[in-house]
Image: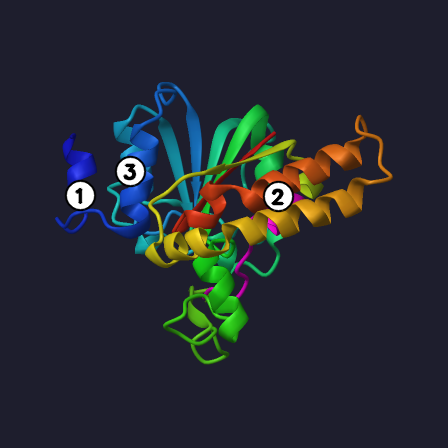
Amino acid sequence: MNDYLKNNPFDGTRYTGVRENIARFFSGRKDWEGKCVIDLSCGEGVTTFILRQLGATVTPYELIPDWSKLEDKPLYADVQKVLPIEDESVDMVVLQEVIEHLPNQLLTLQEAYRILKPGGELFITTPSRSSLQSRLSYLVFESEHLRSTPWSFIDGVWGKNDQGEKYFGHLWLIGIQQLNTLGKVAGFTRTEAHMTEWGKTSAVFMVLFYPFIFLLSLRAFYRDVRKSPREGDYYKEKVAQFRLNVSPRVLLSKYAFVSLFK
């Protein structure tokens, strides 16, 4: 395994969590050479570093550029505003662990769509609101994890930059169905969910509850489409929703890795 996959180049420790999954997923793709990528809200810059090592041309942007540990500091951009990037100029936009922080998620998706070339990809990672573990957490206390309460007013603001622009916590967690729908509203034509490492709690619940989830999802699907022509757009959209709702990739994955295609 290459050094950039084994070790975190910023602090010398092994990649864990989302970083480990990102490194594994991106290194498994062979389409990076010559690809123009925008890393929005790049944070420390680990993903930019990984993609550059894989051959992509990456431009990082960040609301607070001083957070970055890259040799070249990111350009400034607020993903809640119009981006300083030309229309249809990039092959991929990476939005890693960002969308759950944004009060206006649709605007960000629309801006990503605007700057992507036809056929381009918006790659999003976010805490999985749609995994079985997360669904139980929401049932118990509308929280992100069973081990914690929901984000509150006090801990919901993580920081702000010199202009007073605030950086929020996970106040706007989003599930795969809502992300799919917002993507379609923004103009994207297709949603693809990717597999990450399994959540242990989700795996247990999968064995116990999957037959009920599948049957109830199937029942809801047929109730929605019983009067809809099978060649119509509504029927096709409901088929896509059903597939996402019963997908093991969605239900088991500890993290939500989703591609929206222009």
**Mark 3 and mark 2: span between their CA atoms?**
24 Å
Q: State whether residue 147 appears in this view.
A: yes
Please state which amino acid type lies under the numbered disc 2. Asn
Where disc 1 sits, the SS reads loop
Residue beneath the point at 44% across and 76% down: 149
The residue segment tinted magenta is 169-183
Q: Considering only vertical position in the picture, is 4 above or below 75?
A: above
Q: Quadrant of residue 35?
A: top left
Query: x, y percentage for residue 70?
Result: 26, 44
Q: Earlier in the sequence, mark 2 or mark 1?
A: 1
Residue at mark 1: 9
Q: What's the amino acid at mark 1?
A: Pro
Which circle marks residue 62 in the picture? none
Left or right: residue 220 compared with residue 45: right
3 or 1: mark nearer the eye = 3
Q: Are marks 3 and 1 in contact (CB under 8 Å)?
A: no
Disc 3 target residue:
23
Q: Residues within 10 Å of mark 3 (few under 14, many from 20)?
A: some
In the rendered image, residue 220, in percent from the top left (x then y), is placed at 71, 49
Give the residue type at disc 3: Ala
Residue drawn where x is 37% and y is 32% of the image: 58
**Image height of 133 relative to 91, above or below:** below
Q: Find the distance from the CA under tag 2 to the CA under tag 1.
A: 34 Å
Q: Which residue is mark 2?
A: 180
Secondary structure of the residue carrying numbered label 2: helix
Q: Nearer the viewer, mark 3 or mark 2?
A: 2
Q: Quadrant of the C terminus?
A: top right
Q: Nearer the viewer, residue 232 or 213?
A: 213
Q: 90 left or right of 222?
A: left
Asked whether 104 or 69 is in front, the reply is 104
- Which quadrant would the N terminus be assigned to in this image? top left
Seen in the picture, residue 260 relative to 17 is either above or below; the reply is: above
